[in-house]
Amino acid sequence: VGARLKAVGEVGAGNADAASSRILVFVRLRPMSRKEKEAGSRSCVKIVNKKDVYLTEFASETDYLRLKRVRGRHFCFDASFPDTTTQAEVYSTTTSDLVEGVLQGRNGTVFCYGATGAGKTYTMLGTMESPGVMVLAIKDLFSKVRQRSHDGSHSIQLSYLEVYNETVRDLLSPGRPLLLREDKQGTVAAGLTHYRAYSTDEVMKLLQQGNKNRTTEPTRVNETSSRSHAILQAIVEYRSMDGGGSIVTRVGKLSLIDLAGSERAVATDQRTQRSIEGANINRSLLALSSCINALVEGKKHIPYRNSKLTQLLKDSLGGSCNTAMIANISPSNISFGETQNTLHWADRAKEIKTKVLTTANEEILKVPDSETDQVKLVLELQKE
Ligand code: ADP
Ligand code: MG
C-alpha cells in the first residue's frame, strides 16, 4: 500500500547541537555513610561550581598547606553533583533532554558507572520516597505523551533485563536465559517480555520486583550482586496522520543502565588473562572499556561483540544516540582509589564522539485516499 519514504531531518533540531555530538558525562557524589563516618573517614572530594571535581587524599586546607604536595587531581565534567543534589535535579540535568529526544524518534541512553556502594542503584532506581532516574524518566514519558495525545497515538513498552556472568535474563519474567539476535532495531533479546505500563506507581513496583530478581551473590544471599548489569528499556512508538494523508511512525528507545560495580573490572584487569576468562566476572565491563577506548581513538572496528553488554549497547554508544554517563563516587578517603579510577574512566568517556543527530527513526507510509478514513478511525481507537 503506497510508497515508503524515509524522512530525513524533518523533526525539530532538539538535541542536535554541538554538545550532543559526544557523550555527556556527569559525576554524582553521595553523602558520607554512617559506616564511613564510624570508620573515621574524611572527605577527599570537593565539588566546585557544579562542574569541577577536586580529588585529594587529604581533607582539610591545613593538611594541604602542611603537606604541600597532595596526591590527587582536578577534573571537569558537564555537570558535577554535590551530595546535596536531589534526584529530581539529577534527572532534569542528565536525562530529561534525552526523554524529549526519544519522543521525537531518537534513541537515548543513560548509564551509571562506579564502584559498589557508590550510589548507582540509588541514582537509577532510588527509593519509594526518592525515586531515581528510571522512575522519573518513565513518569516524564507518560506525562509528555499525555500532553501530546491530541496529535497522535503513542505506545510505551517497558522491558527490564539483567546481564550476569555473560547471561541475559528477563527481570520482569524470570526464566531461562535469553539469546541475543540482531534485527532492524539493533540487538534484541529474543523472548524478552514487554510490559505496557500506565502509571508511575506501577512502574516503581515493577522495577522493585525486577530488582528482587537480580542475581544474588552465592555467598551473600540477601544482597543484590554487584556483578550484574540491569537495563531498563522503554520503547516509545508514536503514530499519527499528517495533513498529506500519510501515516508517520516514529520509534524512540530509551535505555537506562545500572552497571555492575567497577571495582572488579580493575582488579581482574591486572590479573592474568586466565583469571578473567575463568571467572567471566566482568567481561562485559572490560568490553565496555575496550569499546570506549576504541571509540575515543576513532578506530574503525569497535569490539562490541566481545560481551553481551556491549552487544546490547551497540546502538547506544557509538551510533546515532544521545548518551549520558553518570559516574557515582563516595566522598570517603577509604574509597580514594576507587574514586580515582572512576573519575579517570569518566574523563576518558568525555572524549567519545557520537554522530551528530539529524535523523529520527521515522517512517512515512502514504495512504491512498480511499483508505484515509479507515486509517484515521484506527488511529483514533488506538489513542484510548
Ligand atoms: P551501588 O548501587 O553503586 O552499589 P547504592 O546505590 O546501593 O550503591 O548505594 C549504597 C548506599 O548509599 C545505599 O544505602 C544508598 O541508599 C545510599 N546512597 C547512595 N547514594 C545516595 C544519595 N545520593 N543520597 C542518599 N543516600 C545515598
Ligand atoms: Mg547497586
Image (cartoon, rainbow, N blue to C red):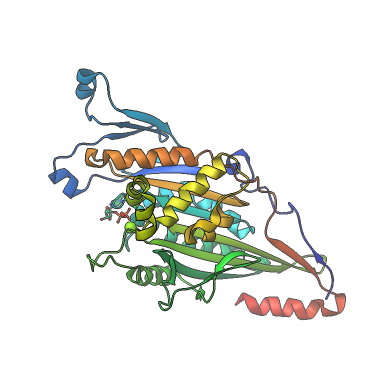
Residue 329 location (% of width, % of height): 33, 44
Residue 134 location (% of width, % of height): 43, 60
Image position of 251 with respect to 339: above or below: below
Q: Is residue 56 visible?
A: yes
Image position of 43 with respect to 302: above or below: above
345 and 267: which is toward the camera: 267
Q: Residue at x 14, y 40 (%)?
A: 40
Q: Residue at x 37, y 54 (%)?
A: 274
Q: Residue at x 40, y 50 (%)?
A: 113
Image position of 85 with respect to 59: above or below: below
Residue 243, quarter of the rendered image: bottom right
Ligand 2, by image quadrant, is: bottom left
230 and 107: which is toward the camera: 230
Q: Is residue 133 visible?
A: no
| Left or right: 333, with 81 as reference point | left
134 and 262: which is toward the camera: 262
The image quadrant where one finds the C terminus is bottom right
Residue 242 location (% of width, % of height): 77, 65
Image position of 91 with respect to 55: above or below: below
Count of marks, rendered view:
0
Residue 145, quarter of the rendered image: bottom right
| Left or right: 40, with 152 as reference point | left
